[in-house]
Amino acid sequence: MNMRLHWTKQTLIYGGAAVWGLLLISCVAANRAVLAPPQIAGATYVGSKECAQCHEEVTTHFASASHAKLGLKDAKGNDSSCEGCHGPGSLHVNAGGGRGTIINPKKSPETCFQCHLDKRGQFQLPYTHPVLAGQVSCVDCHDVHSGNAIRGTGTDLAAQNDTCTKCHTQQKGPFVYSHDAMKEGCVACHQPHGSVNQKMLVARDANLCVRCHLMAPATPSSGIVNIGNNDTAGNHNARLQQGTCWSAGCHEAPHGSNVNNHLRR
Amino acid sequence: MQANAFSLRRCAATLAALTLVIGVARGNDASPSDAFPNFDNYVKIGAFGTDLTGNEAAFQARARQATGTVGIEDMYFAKDLDKTTSMLIDGHALAITGDYLAKFLVTKSDVGSVEMGYKSFRTFYDGAGGFFPLNKYWSTLSPEDLHVDRNQFWAEAKFHLPNQPEFIVRYSNETRSGQKDSTIWGSSDFTGLSILGAPITQYRKMVPSYLNLDERHETLELSATHTLGNTTLNARLAWETVDNLDTRFVTNFPGEVIPWAIASLPSASQPAAKALVSPANWNNQAVTVQSDGISGKTFTAMANSTTTFTDKIQLLAGLSYQDINNDFTGDRPITTSTPTAVGVVAVTPNTNQGLMGNTSGDIYTGFVTLDMHNNNWSVKLSLKGDDTYTKSNANLTNYTAATNTTTGVVTYTATPQQEYSRVKGTSWTPTLDFSYAGLSQVTVYGSISDRSGDFDKYYATPFTAGTTPSANNLEFNDQKDKHLNMNLGANWRQSSLLSLRAEVFHKDETIKDPGYGIDVADFYELASQFSGVKFTAIVKPMDTLTSTTRYIYQKGKMQVTGFQPTFPEYDSCDAENNTISETIDWNPNAQFYLQVNANAVFNTIKTIYPRAGTVAAAGSTPAWDANQVLQNANNNYFTGSVLAGQVLTKEDDLLVKFTYYKASNNDAKLAPITMPYGANAEESAVSVGLKHKFSATCVGDAKVGYIDSKSDLTGGNTNFHGPMGYVSFTFAL
């Protein structure tokens, strides 16, 4: 007896319908909901005033937060700023608090990804902070409950770069010879949410530096890339072949140098 | 036959519709009887393993975990010790992958809390030093498997008696240790690169190196918060110490020069290059050990206040002082050798050694903010000021060596040198923030800040100790900078079906370094202007379907003007970014969900190319357009993911996940002339998981998956693929 399975269009249609039907029938047998994260099955919105009952120390300062500007409201027009990130709070309120009934964005970036979709994509890239791995949280770098979400901007007493140098202490300085790019912030060269380039750099090669460090050519048609000096000494055509400006043993102290004003070591 | 088929389809459709309706009805059940248990206290034990083909170190770097691990994936235990005291234990411990957390917290109502914890995680590196297509040369470290561990221990005590100030004392000790990969210039022709037509190591090329990190950061903080009348005061004192010693190692081996035929040369030209294989023409072995150390102390005192005059007006003010004092060290000994008549002689060529110095800084920062608001609008006016004074000085020894090729005697000349710098300046930042929610379903907001700084910079590059630095060693600069940031946005919640958000932003910055001296490199004006828009649309055509779309556009330019001698303004950068993101959430019934995410990014940075001239330069210098080493730096990529969950039975949930990443930024023009850095990779991973309820106190989770990662940038040397498996059990405690 020779049985062969013939895949036809009808096999796929009826087979697919049967599998789908079986799955749905199996679902009917279970009284349980599954939801894509971050959601809370069975919870409804209660409004931010309810949150303030127990979390006044947080809600008191929220008006100053960047996210407060959005003025999030629920269907009834009530302020829903808290639940915009923490999910609908009815189960949490009814239970008198506790885990499992409310979303804690510190534990998972999914809450932030709901609006910051682009950041989900960036954290999937090869060079990024380990947020998806759960080792770094969005709130390690961003203040979401008060003040500017991007630390160090506006009137924050701390500097913007402190967000980075609290962990990357070797790059904090001050150095004997500083790099003015640090005044623009670490993000002038690094994309902290993730990059296709090593070290989370915004550009892959010498383009990163040449964005700023370019001298007008002595002779515009010469084709020579002058960096540093506008003469023979500034001709970097060969240097640019030898690798990036920073990894190639030349200007390898881009955050600041204690030896050389051209950021060498 | 057709009637039967139609009947079957109709039955299937009816069945599907019926079950969808039932599913939706079940989804609205506030207390589903078959819900998985939500454990208050639990321990989750898990194991992960792979059976990979290819570069396992690359997998570890990409996945941020070891190829196999086992341990406590999560643990949470909270208990009331008495009516007013509770304790909490939170943690995980995953061996091999080096991921640990142990947190212990005791809280007593109306008294305070005590917390202690330890956290550690590992970052993996693959030792890749680059791939050079010309010779198909894979430059890599041995071993490739490197990692750096970050560890943190902390202890915190909080005291807060009713109606009394709140005091917090916190100590933390963070360390960072291990090895990470890097690259550096070295004498190597394995790369096959013929730089400016010179096939041998006339110009140094890239070789792999690694950094050994040994860093420690300790912090002791005291803070107090108290409310007096309508004013809340907060004060913080912090003492920090940093003790870092990072060391770079690189070895160039004899024979790294021209062991290969030069692919770029025709065969008739090869003998000259091959002749260089003669040992007399070998490069010498060179070992470079470069260390950078910092031993520093920072003291910070900070205070701020919030005074509420009425429910509509607040005044905020703050002041901070930071005293930084860092001692630094550095060495760059290079040990190489040279053939002489009496044999190979070790030589230490021109290096800087024995760097010892100090940097110190005093930084004052203050701000005042007037915050006015009512139900519909808010206006915040702020002014921030910074005053910075940093100074540095250091000594080092510059070594040069000369070798007598007859006697082999090496003569060293050691020149003690010194250097110093000073930067002093102030900056001011006025800021206006506002929002208005008086329009129906619309909130409008905006912000504008304009930071301007004026700094006096003065430094002396290394000069012979005990002498007066020459003009060539000195630089004075009166630096002025301006940074304007603006944004204007609106959030329109049209109905539960549609929300639209849009924000436009603009940045305009200028740094003027007019200084005086002989080196044009340090004196220039840099300007940049970037503008863009962020747009978000949340569409919910039905309760079970949500579409969220986000589009970000940014375009900007930068210009450089040389000051000395004066050169015209020249465009140095032209950048454009388009990011399109989409998330679709579909819950056709309570027992099924589907979430689809996609991101497409088109990002280009243009610098000198292709604006450089097109005419070949005179003499031996090749024309820029023949060089073409700088192509546009594209950072394009696509990422996507699909997540689906399905209730199977009363005890089982099915979870399917698929992720995808692709980047195609490589440029074939770069391969013959430099390392082609543009990401060119494709990666996909799929997993199917089953979550099973064994009992009311035990839930299991099992997944099988497959990952496939390819990178043309590394010539396939970091490719890997293979199955993955995962299992975990969560027990109620």
Image (cartoon, rainbow, N blue to C red):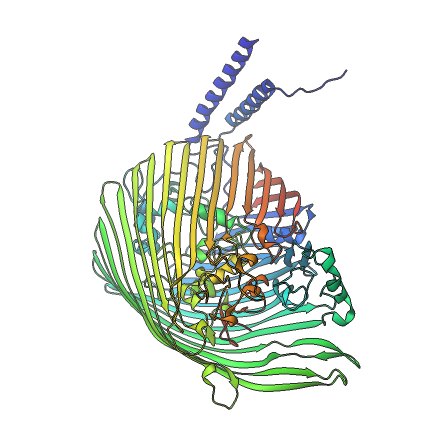
Where residue A242 sits in the image (x, y, percent)? 59, 63
Task: Point out the residue furthest to the right here.
Answer: B342
| Residue shown at 45% from the left, 53% from the top | A138
Task: Point out the residue furthest to the bottom here.
Answer: B466
| Residue shown at 30% from the left, 40% from the top | B493
| Residue shown at 44% from the left, 73% from the top | B520
In screen coordinates, is B78 left or right of A6? left
- For residue B143, which quarter of the picture? bottom right
Near-viewer residue (B309 or A182): A182
Quadrant of image for the C terminus of chain A:
bottom right
Q: Is residue B516 visible?
A: yes
- Give the total of numbered labels: 0
Where residue A126 sits in the image (x, y, percent)? 56, 51
> In the picture shown, does residue A39 fall above or below A160?
above
Where residue A149 sits in the image (x, y, percent)? 37, 56
| Residue shown at 40% from the left, 39% from the top | B548
In screen coordinates, is A259 left or right of B534? right
Task: Point out the residue furthest to the front here.
Answer: B618
Q: Is residue B317 visible?
A: no
> In the picture shown, does residue B47 fall above or below B275?
above
Quadrant of image for the N terminus of chain A:
top right
Near-viewer residue (B460 or B355): B460
Where residue B386 sits in the image (x, y, percent)? 33, 71
